[in-house]
Amino acid sequence: MSVRVPFLDLAAQNAEVADEVLPVWQRQFATAGFVGGPEIDAFEREYAAYIGVAHVVALSNGTDALELAYRAAGVRPGDEVVMPANTFIATAEAASRIGAVPVFVDVDDEHLLIDPVAADAAITDRTRAVVPVHLFGQTAPVEHLAPIAARHGLAVIEDAAQAQGARSPAGRAGSLATVAATSFYPGKNLGAAGDAGALLTGDDDIADLARRLSCHGSAAKYVHDRIGMNARMDAVQAVVLRAKLRRLDVWNAARRMAAARYDALLADVDGVRIPRVRVGNEDVWHLYVVRVDDRDRVMAELAEAGIGTGIHYPTPVPFTAAYAPLGVRTGQFPVAERAASQMLSLPMFPHLTEAQQLRVVEVLRSCVRARRRTEAAA
Ligand SMILES: *Cc1c(COP(=O)(O)O)cnc(C)c1O
């Protein structure tokens, strides 16, 4: 039996919400209600209640949300922003776009999240903010970063793009610091039908400033008190997000069940290092990332067997060509660099079936075993 397993399949979740979304889209189209309006307002209220923050500002995408979070939290041109080397480039890009300087630090080997000790050591008198990235679906150690940030008078800005619904003992991702940015890119745990994002904060002034900046620096039509941008969420996206938000907990629970199944199936597979959850965290498994040697070959063999996988991320951000001008050296981020050559994201989405997971593990097990035999023979 040969089951094809896509890395990600969004068709099933879209089918689940189609009956709720399509009639509202039809109405929006007929009335040309595309910018702002009741769906945006309702989504902002509902998402704020779900996460447990006072304010949600619905935005165009996660990168714009990060840029606005940085600006609204007081990051200015020339300021340094401390962030992990293993993240999606947008975390850094958003800082660079406003003339700030990303300062990369290594991650911890156990969870591949920002290392608070490394973050502390990277702080200079130009540092303005530190960014815990809740990578792969679990919260980064905000509880260790917050006291460090407080000692140095820094803002803590969460990148919650991969952790919609994730919990730490202190609350949900997005409610753990001064301000947070998230992305509703289609493949995220809560995904739109295109690009969308949001800024989350408990601070009235930050919310107000971010909202104005996202709309041409304007609170009232044609009154512009500062140079902003156009970063509003399209109203059509709020319709999809409202429908999917109602199912997010069920879908995240399905991901947790799938992760537990991978954990059990892979526990006795030598040569596959399974992901770990920080004590007290409730992980929402945006990605299930294992580590294997000879990763590229394993990935190619899985692909040949009809199994889709991903790499998050093949190049730590400071080593991308975009950040070559920073002049970082090989060996500066030993954990992130080693992980970049070993990480492999297995298929993970709420509607992944047990049969699909059994197939993934069966093939992965045989790839790793074949490699061990080759090694032994050499
Ligand atoms: C997806 C993502 C972003 C950027 O979001 P976009 O909506 O694609 O702009 C930022 N940070 C992380 C960690 C992400 O995974």
Image (cartoon, grey):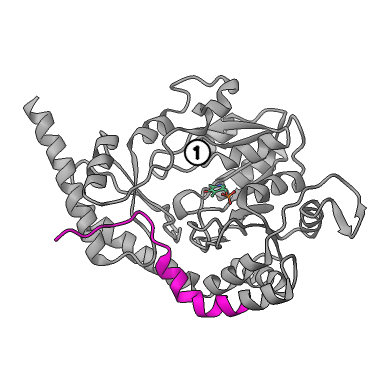
The residue closer to the viewer here, 280 or 260, is: 260
Q: Position of residue 49 (x, y in %)?
A: 64, 71
Occupied quadrant, residue 34: bottom right
Q: How many marks?
A: 1
Q: Which residues are magenta?
A: 1-24
Occupied quadrant, residue 243: bottom right
Q: Is residue 76 magenta?
A: no
Establish if 42 lies above or below 107: below
Q: Residue at x 75, y 67 (%)?
A: 36
Q: Position of residue 5 (x, y in %)?
A: 28, 57
Label 1 within 8 A of ligand 1 by Cβ: no
- Position of 334 with respect to 378 (left or right) is right
Image quarter where the N terminus lies is: bottom left
Q: Can you identify the residue that label 1 sits on?
A: 115
Q: Position of residue 148 (x, y in %)?
A: 62, 40
Badge 1 element: loop
Q: Position of residue 158 (x, y in %)?
A: 61, 50
- Position of 201 with respect to 143 (left or right) is right
Query: Amino acid under label 1?
Result: Asp
Q: Residue at x 36, y 67 (%)?
A: 351
Q: Residue at x 86, y 55 (%)?
A: 218
The residue closer to the viewer here, 306 or 280, is: 306
Q: Can residue 316 be spotted in the picture?
A: yes
The residue closer to the viewer here, 27 or 218, is: 27
Establish if 236 lies above or below 275: below
Q: Is residue 12 magenta?
A: yes
Q: Residue at x 32, y 64 (%)?
A: 352
Q: Can residue 268 be spotted in the picture?
A: no
Image quarter where the C terminus lies is: top left
